[in-house]
Image (cartoon, rainbow, N blue to C red):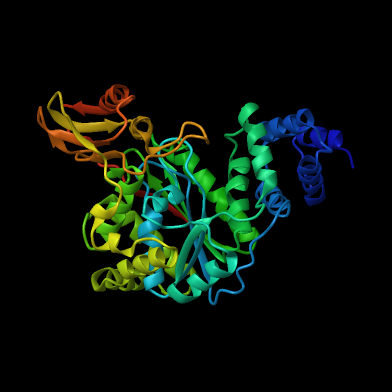
């Protein structure tokens, strides 16, 4: 078997075999296939695509390139949730405690953020004392005892994805459905979950800007899950405005806690409940959406969901009293109101620019070496379709370092469009792909 034959076969539009895909992945990870030949194959895949079986074979070959997590020490069905990323997307911190309070087992390994705002780990680390570094035996014990734990990725998971992604980035082959789906699902499968609920974003703050492309990505990932023997469902959800009101790490933790205490009805809570419903159903803990929602709302109203989060925080070394007093989370030194300069309806938001505004304050990273300030960010006071008058507060900026403040506010103002007519309301959930 030779890599040149594999490149030629794919260039001709033919289907690659499982053995050919494994040969490529193993050879590239081992250093026997050079970057220029791997680049050539990636480009042929970009042009000619891969079918569901090829995509699954690629995913599983990447999984086999490194360590895999054995979660057999956790009783019951282990369910994971993954979002393709967005602004103010704090669903994990709401959904995981909800599912745990209903008897689910959420064993989640997350990553850090690069770009708009922090990742789930960065948000959790804004809780004083909390450690996302836990030994595997402790991680599994926590999930058995309290139903959830969220930690950083351990071991050498999916080295093929790390190496291939770096190459895709510099060869402009990132935006291919099979390659994106394989990258995401390889990490989910390697993390050991039995069931996976995917939140695929669409819109101005998402990687996929159109509903059609987002549904295509959702379908590709669900197909991989099915062929790999994992129960998998994907929801295609809107990211044309921040999902929650808070954009920034400690601020997002605060909003999640307040939702679990019964506050903040809105898109973030609705999306978290929808994802939680599917997590319960794939776990065998609910027969229908109606059944799941009854259990979830009971967990909210009784305080059981908030208590599950409190237990996880305490078990991982954090201060559980933040669940009772969110002011114990990191606080910014200065609050600045950003006001509307014209009247009308909030008709459009450039969500990526809103995320960049928060990043410029220190809530996200431009490079992996950047240090996040957990206290900073912004809190939205207006949403799409809201009517505003001149001088109304659109958002409150939470600021420490003011070096990029002027640019941050300028970009934020440019991202908010205020028009003369009320815009059509966008769906929050566009599609469920089973």
- The number of numbered discs placed on residues in the rendered structure image is 0
Q: Residue 226, relative to residue 403: is it above or below?
A: below
Visible in this render: residue 212? yes
153 in relation to 377, above or below: below
431, 254: nearer the viewer: 254
**Seen in the image, is 34 located left or right of residue 335?**
right
* Residue 277 in view: no
In the rendered image, residue 134, in percent from the top left (x then y), is placed at 53, 61
Against 366, is 272 above or below?
below
Residue at image point 47% right, 37% down: 207
In which quadrant is the N terminus drawn? top right
Using the image as rendered, state which of residue 299 and residue 422 is in the foreground.
Answer: 299
* Residue 82 rendering spot, x and y as whole percentages: 48, 53
**Which residue shows up at 24% across the image and 70% down it?**
301
Of residue 151 and residue 75, the one placed in the foreground of this image is: 151
- Residue 330, position in %: x, y? 30, 47
The image quadrant that residue 174 belongs to is top right
Side of 120 where 169 appears, left or right? right
Q: Nearer the viewer, residue 120 or 82?
A: 120
Name the residue located 27 percent from the left edge and 45 percent from the top edge: 331
Please tell me whether residue 128 is drawn above or below residue 45 in the rendered image: below
| Residue in view at x 65 percent, y 44 percent | 161
Can you give x and y, in whole percent of width and height, for residue 15 in the image? 76, 43
């Amino acid at each position: 078997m030779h890599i040149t034959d594999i490149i030629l076969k794919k260039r001709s539009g033919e289907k690659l075999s499982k053995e050919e895909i494994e040969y490529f992945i193993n050879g590239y990870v081992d250093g026997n296939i050079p970057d220029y030949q791997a680049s050539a194959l990636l480009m042929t895949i970009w042009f000619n695509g891969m079918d569901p079986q090829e995509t699954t074979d690629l995913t599983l070959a990447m999984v086999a390139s490194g360590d895999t997590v054995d979660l057999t020490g956790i009783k019951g069905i282990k369910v994971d949730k993954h979002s393709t990323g967005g602004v103010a997307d704090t669903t994990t911190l709401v959904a995981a405690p909800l599912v745990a309070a209903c008897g689910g087992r959420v064993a989640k390994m997350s990553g850090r953020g690069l770009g708009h705002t922090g990742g789930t780990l960065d948000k959790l680390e804004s809780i004083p004392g909390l450690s996302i570094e836990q030994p595997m035996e402790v991680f599994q014990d926590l999930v058995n005892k309290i139903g959830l734990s969220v930690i950083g990725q351990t071991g050498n998971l999916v080295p093929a994805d790390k190496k291939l992604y770096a190459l895709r980035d510099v060869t402009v082959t990132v935006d291919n459905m099979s390659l994106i789906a394989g990258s995401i699902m390889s990490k989910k499968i390697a993390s050991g979950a039995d069931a996976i609920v995917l939140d695929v974003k669409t819109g101005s703050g998402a990687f996929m800007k159109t509903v059609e492309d987002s549904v295509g990505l959702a379908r590709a990932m669900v197909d991989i899950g099915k062929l790999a023997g994992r129960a998998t469902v994907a929801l295609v959800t809107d990211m044309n405005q921040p999902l929650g009101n808070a954009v920034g790490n400690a601020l997002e933790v605060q909003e999640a806690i307040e939702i679990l205490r019964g506050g903040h009805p809105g898109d973030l809570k609705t999306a978290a409940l929808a994802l939680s419903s599917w997590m319960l159903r794939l776990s065998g803990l609910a027969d229908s959406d109606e059944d799941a929602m009854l259990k979830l709302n009971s967990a909210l109203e009784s305080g059981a969901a908030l208590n599950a989060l409190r237990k996880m925080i305490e078990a991982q070394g954090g201060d559980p009293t933040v669940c009772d007093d969110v002011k114990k989370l990191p606080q910014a030194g200065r609050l600045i109101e950003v006001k509307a300069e014209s009247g009308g309806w909030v008709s459009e938001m450039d969500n990526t620019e809103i995320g960049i505004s928060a990043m410029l304050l220190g809530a996200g990273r431009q490079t992996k070496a950047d240090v996040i300030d957990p206290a900073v960010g912004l809190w939205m006071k207006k949403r799409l379709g809201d009517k505003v008058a001149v001088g109304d507060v659109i958002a409150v900026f939470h600021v420490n370092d003011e070096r990029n403040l002027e640019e941050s506010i300028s970009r934020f103002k440019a991202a908010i469009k205020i028009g003369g007519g009320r815009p059509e309301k966008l769906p929050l959930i566009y599609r469920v792909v089973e």
